[in-house]
Amino acid sequence: DAGVTQSPTHLIKTRGQQVTLRCSPKSGHDTVSWYQQALGQGPQFIFQYYEEEERQRGNFPDRFSGHQFPNYSSELNVNALLLGDSALYLCASRRVDGANVLTFGAGSRLTVL
Amino acid sequence: AQTVTQSQPEMSVQEAETVTLSCTYDTSESDYYLFWYKQPPSRQMILVIRQEAYKQQNATENRFSVNFQKAAKSFSLKISDSQLGDAAMYFCASSNSGYALNFGKGTSLLVTP
């Protein structure tokens, strides 16, 4: 049973560029959320998607946007990259009617130069 | 808003010994969940244990147990019979009813032979 898969695992961008990160949830899960984990910090909630709509959003600027597809997979887009966007981006999934337990992917490591 | 504080940046324990990781949280909600996650060098967050705030009984999962003090807003993790594979970053987190997780800054656990 595949868990949460994320791609790419590592990428390097320069300031001002745009990036798209992808996530496939665990089989049977319909809700996807994204977290940003800066070096040496705990993850911070970006947003959560269910039924292809953003349901809840953390304290992140509009440069961060997302999408959920009919097959429940999700994308995180970040525009106008800043040096401070360098971080590990974690995707997590759950069943909306299941227990309050998230399954995390291994993350995408973004470096902005 | 919920905040989670982990006051121990690093802890060390000898193999087979017991160690306790501290966590305090602050929330105005009456219904919430508390979690301990483990993040090994592979980066994937792994759920260690979960506690529902309305349950007075402390959660246990094999060698892992919590001491949940609701009035004091304290949620510590005890690891018994520590193993080399327990070495990782440990994050305490809180959540309201299935939504965003609020993480602490983490405690790095070193296990020595």
Image: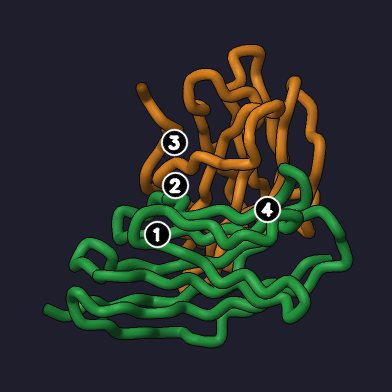
Chain colours: A orange, B green
- Rate crowding at label 2 as few (under 14), some (14 to 19) or many (20 or more) other CA atoms within 10 Å: many
Which amino acid type corresponds to the residue marked 4 in the rendered image? Glu
Specify the quadrant of the image occupied by residue B84: bottom left
Marks 1 and 4, the one that precedes in the sequence: 1
Question: Looking at the picture, how far across and down is residue B57, in whole percent?
Answer: 62, 59
Circle 1/circle 3 CB separation < 8 Å: no
Q: Nearer the viewer, mark 1 or mark 4?
A: 4
**CA separation in Å, label 4 and label 2:** 30 Å
Instruction: Please tell me which residue is depicted at 68% across the width and 53% down the height of the picture.
Output: B52
Q: In front: mark 2 or mark 1?
A: 1
Disc 3: which residue: A6
For the N terminus of chain B, which image quadrant?
Answer: bottom right
Q: Quadrant of residue A53?
A: top right
Q: Are marks 2 and 3 in contact (CB under 8 Å)?
A: yes
Q: CA distance from mark 2 to mark 3?
A: 7 Å
3D distance between C-alphas at marks 1 and 4: 22 Å
| Chain identity of mark 1 | B
Q: Which residue is mark 2?
A: A108
Q: Which mark is residue B52?
A: 4
Co-location on one chain, circles 3 and 4 = no
Instruction: State the CA–CA distance, disc 2 to disc 1.
Output: 15 Å
Is B46 situated above or below A105? below
Q: Which residue is mark 1?
A: B39
> Relative to B87, does residue A112 appear above or below in the rendering?
above
- Label 3, secondary structure: give it: strand
Residue A12 at least partly seen: no
- Report the residue at 68% width, 61% height from top: B56
Q: Do marks 2 and 3 share a subunit?
A: yes
Chain under label 4? B
Q: Is the residue under label 2 in contact with that under label 4 (CB below 8 Å)?
A: no
